Amino acid sequence: MPVLARTLEKAGLATILVTNMPFWAEKIGTPRTLGVEFPFGHTLGMPGDVSMQRRVIRQALEALQSIRQPGEIVHSPEQWPVPVKEAIEAWQPPQPSPIVSIMGDHVRKVISQRRRKRKG
């Protein structure tokens, strides 16, 4: 998405990324970002909660209008109505998909290698 956003920005279209990973948005350089503290897969809000989803969309449009510096991140004041740990557990399937299993092993290996390099 950031590559598409930068491409659209070069063409003169303003963009904003709504994400639950504002840390990564900052690292990869999105033009504008609205950070939300929501579980993965629920970037605009609770399923079926049209009111919450509209508030998030309005916040994104307001941030699109108000952000003046490239790369600026605005954080949404919206709170997830369920404790995050419960939401994550409810969202996760009992068995991970094959790609998640493969990527999980890969990520754990990379983290382990980095820890060893720091100690060594």
Image (tube, rainbow, N blue to C red):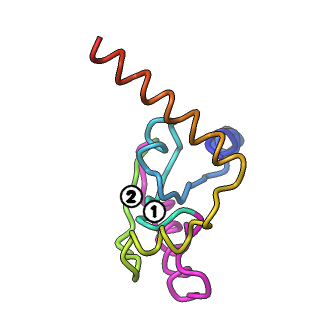
Q: Quadrant of residue 74?
A: bottom left
Q: Amino acid at mark 1?
A: Ala
Where 104 falls versus 115 (above or below)? below
Q: Residue at x 44, y 30 (%)?
A: 111
User: Do the residues bearing badges 2 and 1 touch, measured as CB atoms within 8 Å?
Assistant: yes
* x and y percentages locating residue 108 in the rendered image: 49, 35
Q: Nearer the viewer, residue 63 or 53?
A: 53
Taking the spot 52% from the left edge, 57% from the top edge, the residue there is 19
Q: Is residue 47 above or below residue 36?
A: below
Residue 88 is marked as: none
Amino acid type of the residue that numbered disc 2 sits on in the rendered structure: Val
Q: From the image, which quarter does the C terminus lie in?
A: top left
Image location (x, y in percent) of residue 30:
53, 43
Q: In this orientation, which residue lies closer to the viewer: 84 or 76?
A: 84
Q: Earlier in the sequence, mark 2 or mark 1?
A: 1
* Number of dots carrying numbers: 2
* Circle 1 Cα neighbour tier, 10 Å, few/some/many (<14 / 14–19 / ≥20): many
Residue occupied by mark 1: 63
What is the C-alpha distance between the residues marked 2 and 1? 7 Å
Marking on residue 74: 2
Image location (x, y in percent) of residue 82? 40, 81
Image: 106 above or below 13: above
Q: Residue furthest top?
A: 120
Q: Is residue 116 left or right of residue 71?
A: left
Q: Which residues are magenta?
A: 41-70
The residue that appears at 53% across and 68% down in the rendered structure is 61
Residue 86 in picture, x, y percent from top left? 42, 75
Q: Is residue 56 magenta?
A: yes
